[in-house]
Image: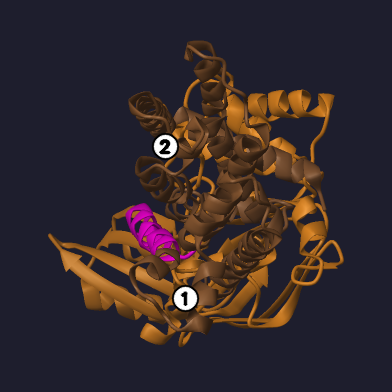
Chain colours: A orange, B brown
């Protein structure tokens, strides 16, 4: 559905996208992650034909975004980052206008507008002026706009920014339900959302793709994976000695307070040390009051990949 | 060419225009000025017999000209500037529309509103017929020539305003620069009346003189050179506008 090859975007003096290549197959939901300024929006703007690339090519459904931009634009629904809407129109008027503009004709205009309004829960505000709507509603109007012509590909630039937790959950479910039938490329900073919705994640940093994999595989790669935190009543140096003696531990940090010691244990790759810790405590008769394995989140992956050079 | 796209954008433009108070304020002042001008034209005829018809006096009036200079900058200031400022330009240009379809639709919307502003004045000559004590013959030809001239002038000023609006996201800048440019075009043509420039310059100034064209058309003389000037200048300005919005995205 998307074919990007060696894409470069240079603004006056700044290289925002530095030769990225990736492809997305039909039906995939791909999360586009990266710190602010990593080149996510630039890439999305090129894919949606808003601006041309400096070099390289981007193809949507086999059509080049530069030479066949009308064909591409007919097949995509793009939701820009800052949610631009004509605020002097009502929700109905706006969606009707957008549907017609995107080539929906005749009776289908009415049915499509009604469908997307229902999907985005906009029925209660149909007749309201967009200028009077809250941020959450505007966000959903923009989402409805992106879907109104039933495009094959949805490009959503931070679709859940500014929504409350309930609305975020609703939009997440909506996006999930659209997968399979539609291809979706979405950028966001809300990482749990990506974990739950996306079948694949692309992490961009400084204009380059740093990782492209399923969320599960990415989390397996993280160094802090399998880290264990434990707290028991013992002397700090005795505890450290006992743990390092296991031989499966790479690093161990201890902090002592009130006779208790808190240890952070980084085991070697693939090792689970929780059982061993329990056995040590049992053997030494140390009172154990905490033993948790750190659950790796996409956030850890994100931080590790995008902050590497700071360390 | 996709007429449907043009129609849809045109409708949206007109709707937004009529939903803003600006449209009604403009209509109010325009009718006030044209009505007032018509009244003084009739009064002028009441004072003493003239060599001109009432519509000739009407179209040559100073107030009409000043109103003409202001109207297009105000009508076109939002066209692109507002879209840039709100970011709706991004939504518009990522829909399957071609650059020049957008330019043409916005141009036609402004012209449609302009025509609507002028439409009521068509009645004036008929009103004059009714109120005149002695029956006066209608001079249809010159009157319609005058209206053709009004339309062509609108076409030129609208294209100019649209181009300037496409250059900035600030409506105030757009309206001021448009106003200055429109005045420059207008007053360049008047220079011949104040100075006596040498032959070639005089010819050029006379070629672009809106005032002189109006005079000729008012006498029922259809000057094809003027027609070519307005059509080609407007077309060129619209072409430039298209290039500007294209380049806006290149640099976006």
At x 30%, y 75%, the residue is A253
Q: Nearer the viewer, residue B101 or B192?
A: B192
Majority secondary structure in the magenta region: helix
First reached walking from the N terminus: tag 1 or tag 2: 2
Instruction: Residue at the far right: name it.
Output: A62
Q: Quadrant of residue A93?
A: top right
Q: Position of residue A302 (x, y in %)?
A: 49, 68
In the depicted structure, whether residue A251 falls above or below residue B49: below
Q: Position of residue A160 (x, y in %)?
A: 50, 45
Q: CA distance from mark 1 to mark 2?
A: 30 Å
Left or right of residue B40: residue B113 = right
Q: Position of residue A36 (x, y in %)?
A: 43, 67
Give the chain of mark 2. A
Any part of residue A168 in sight: no
Give the chain of mark 1. A
Residue under pointer 1: A306
Q: Nearer the viewer, residue B36 or B134?
A: B134
Q: Position of residue A75 (x, y in %)?
A: 79, 52
Magenta stretch bounds: B166-187
In the depicted structure, whether residue A298 falls above or below residue B44: below
At x 39%, y 71%, the residue is A265
Left or right of residue A180: residue B74 = left
Q: Quadrant of residue A187?
A: bottom right
Residue A4 shown in magenta: no
Within 10 Å of disc 1 (Cα), the crowding (few <14, some 14-19, many 20+) is some
Any part of residue B4 in sight: yes
Within 10 Å of disc 2 (Cα), the crowding (few <14, some 14-19, many 20+) is some
**Disc on res. A135:** 2
């Amino acid at each position: 559905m998307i074919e990007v090859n060696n894409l470069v975007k240079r603004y006056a003096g700044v290289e925002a996208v530095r030769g990225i290549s990736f492809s997305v197959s039909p039906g995939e939901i791909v999360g586009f992650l990266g710190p602010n300024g990593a080149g996510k929006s630039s890439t999305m703007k090129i894919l949606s034909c808003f601006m041309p690339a400096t070099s390289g090519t981007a193809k949507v459904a086999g059509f080049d975004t530069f030479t066949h931009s009308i064909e591409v634009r007919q097949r995509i629904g793009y939701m820009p980052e800052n949610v631009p809407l004509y605020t002097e129109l009502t929700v109905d008027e706006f969606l009707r206008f957008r549907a017609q503009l995107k080539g929906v004709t005749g009776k289908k205009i009415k049915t499509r507008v009604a469908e997307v309004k229902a999907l985005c829960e906009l029925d209660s505000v149909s007749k309201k002026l967009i200028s009077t709507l809250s941020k959450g509603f505007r966000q959903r109007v923009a989402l409805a706009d992106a879907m109104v012509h039933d495009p094959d590909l949805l490009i959503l630039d931070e679709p859940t920014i500014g929504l409350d937790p309930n609305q975020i959950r609703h939009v997440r479910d909506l996006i999930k339900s659209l997968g399979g039938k539609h291809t979706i490329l979405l950028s966001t900073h809300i990482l749990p959302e990506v974990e739950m919705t996306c079948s694949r994640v692309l992490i961009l940093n400084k204009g380059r793709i740093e990782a492209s994999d399923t969320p599960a595989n990415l989390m397996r790669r993280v160094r802090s994976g399998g880290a264990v935190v434990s707290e028991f009543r013992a002397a700090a140096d005795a505890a450290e000695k006992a743990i390092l003696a296991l031989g499966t531990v790479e690093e161990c940090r201890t902090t002592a307070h009130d006779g208790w010691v808190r240890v952070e244990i980084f085991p070697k790759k693939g090792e689970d040390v929780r059982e061993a810790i329990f056995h040590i405590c049992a053997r030494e008769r140390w009172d154990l009051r905490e033993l948790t394995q750190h659950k790796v989140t996409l956030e850890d992956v994100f931080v590790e990949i995008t902050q590497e050079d700071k360390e | 060419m996709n007429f449907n796209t043009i129609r849809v954008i045109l409708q949206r433009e007109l709707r937004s225009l009529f939903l803003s108070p600006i449209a009604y304020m403009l209509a109010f002042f325009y009718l006030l000025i044209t009505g007032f001008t018509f009244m003084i034209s009739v009064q002028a005829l009441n004072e003493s017999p003239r060599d001109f018809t009432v519509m000739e006096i009407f179209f040559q009036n100073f107030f009409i000209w000043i109103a003409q200079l202001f109207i297009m900058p105000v009508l076109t200031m939002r066209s692109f500037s507002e879209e840039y400022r709100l970011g709706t330009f991004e939504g518009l240009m990522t829909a399957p529309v071609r650059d020049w379809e957008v330019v043409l639709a916005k141009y036609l919307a402004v012209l449609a509103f302009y025509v609507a502003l002028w439409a009521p004045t068509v009645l004036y000559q008929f009103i004059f017929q009714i109120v005149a004590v002695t029956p006066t013959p209608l001079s249809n030809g010159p009157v319609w020539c005058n209206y053709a001239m009004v339309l062509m002038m609108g076409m030129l000023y609208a294209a100019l305003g649209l181009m300037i609006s496409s250059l900035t996201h600030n409506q105030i800048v757009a309206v001021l620069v448009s106003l200055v440019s429109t005045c420059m075009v207008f007053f360049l043509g008047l220079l011949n009346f104040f100075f006596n420039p040498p032959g070639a310059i005089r010819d050029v100034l006379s070629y672009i003189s809106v005032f002189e064209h109006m005079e000729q058309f008012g006498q029922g003389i259809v000057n094809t050179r003027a027609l070519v000037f307005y059509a080609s200048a407007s077309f060129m300005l619209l072409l430039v506008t298209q290039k500007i919005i294209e380049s806006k995205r290149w640099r976006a």
